[in-house]
Amino acid sequence: MSKLQNKVAIVTGASKGIGAAIAQALAAEGASVVVNYASSKDGADTVVDRIAAAGGQAIAVRGDVSKQADAQAIVDAAIERFGRLDVLVNNSGVYGFAPLEEITEDDFRRQFDINVLGLLLTTQAAAKHMGEGASIINIGSVVTRIVPPGSAVYSGTKGAVDAITGVLAQELGPRRIRVNALNPGMIVTEGTQAAGIVGSDMEADVVAHTPLGRVGQPDDIASIAVFLASNDSYWLTGEQLFAGGGIR
């Protein structure tokens, strides 16, 4: 039997990149998936179509996770369509890099609103419907380990994700709901390509400091998300799993 048969999952920010790969991987293991997107309906519809073509079930649901009403609506859509909720992947996130002297209030608020407040609001709405055996997966980043220059705001948001993961593991543990952080290194996505990171000196430096000798692909993260969503990880909660090819 598939690892996630009869389970229902929400993946936020799933219209492309890591989120899309996770949504497809969860569906391949039997989960019915809510593919959340903020702006790219075409991307989300493509992910849903791929899941359907492979024999799975999925729906695309628009919503800005940093808005409480939207976060609630995403969860409501899962319950209305599939009747339950077992897995939440808090993947929605934005990033920006700037030295200390160039940090702005707007950029700070944008990153913290989506990366931190969005995670809290979506989890708040989802947890009401989750029970024993459920899994919450918060997508963090290895930046909290390697703290690169120019990443004060982004690293701050992901440090918050790590801390919140530990707190929620304590709060939800009595209900047998697991909460873990999955922290990728550099991943080749539409975002990193558009930002000019792929093929840059930054990528070369990352590879030079990565024991496995390459940057990651979305599927490298998706397979770990399946593990965390499934009963294979039933004795893990409050953990931070770094997935960066060994980068330190």
Image (cartoon, rainbow, N blue to C red):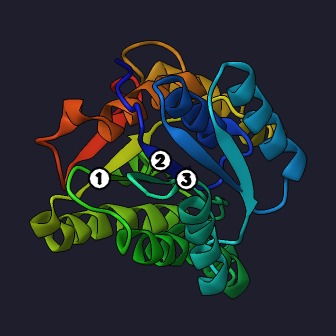
Type of the residue with mark 2: Val
Q: Residue at x 60, y 30 (%)?
A: 24
Distance from the alpha carbon under mark 1 to that under mark 2: 10 Å
Instruction: Tell me the quarter of the image containing the N terminus.
Output: top left
Relative horizontal placement of residue 130, taking residue 108 as reference (left or right): left
The mark that comes first in sequence, 1 or 2, is 2
- Figure check: 92 above or below 205: below
Q: Which mark is residue 215?
A: none
Q: Secondary structure at mark 2?
A: strand
User: Decide: marks 2, 3 in contact (CB < 8 A)?
Assistant: yes
The mark that comes first in sequence, 2 or 3, is 2
Q: Residue at x 80, y 37 (%)?
A: 196
Relative horizontal placement of residue 50, taking residue 186 as reference (left or right): right
Name the residue tied to disc 3: 82
Q: Position of residue 157 (x, y in %)?
A: 47, 68
Q: Position of residue 122 (x, y in %)?
A: 50, 71
Neighbours of disc 1 within 10 Å: few (<14), some (14-19), many (20+):
many
Q: Residue at x 39, y 21 (%)?
A: 2
Q: Nearer the viewer, mark 1 or mark 3?
A: 3
Name the residue tied to disc 2: 8
Distance from the alpha carbon under mark 2 to that under mark 3: 7 Å
Q: Secondary structure at mark 3?
A: helix
Name the residue tied to disc 1: 134
Q: Position of residue 64 (x, y in %)?
A: 70, 72
The mark that comes first in sequence, 1 or 3, is 3
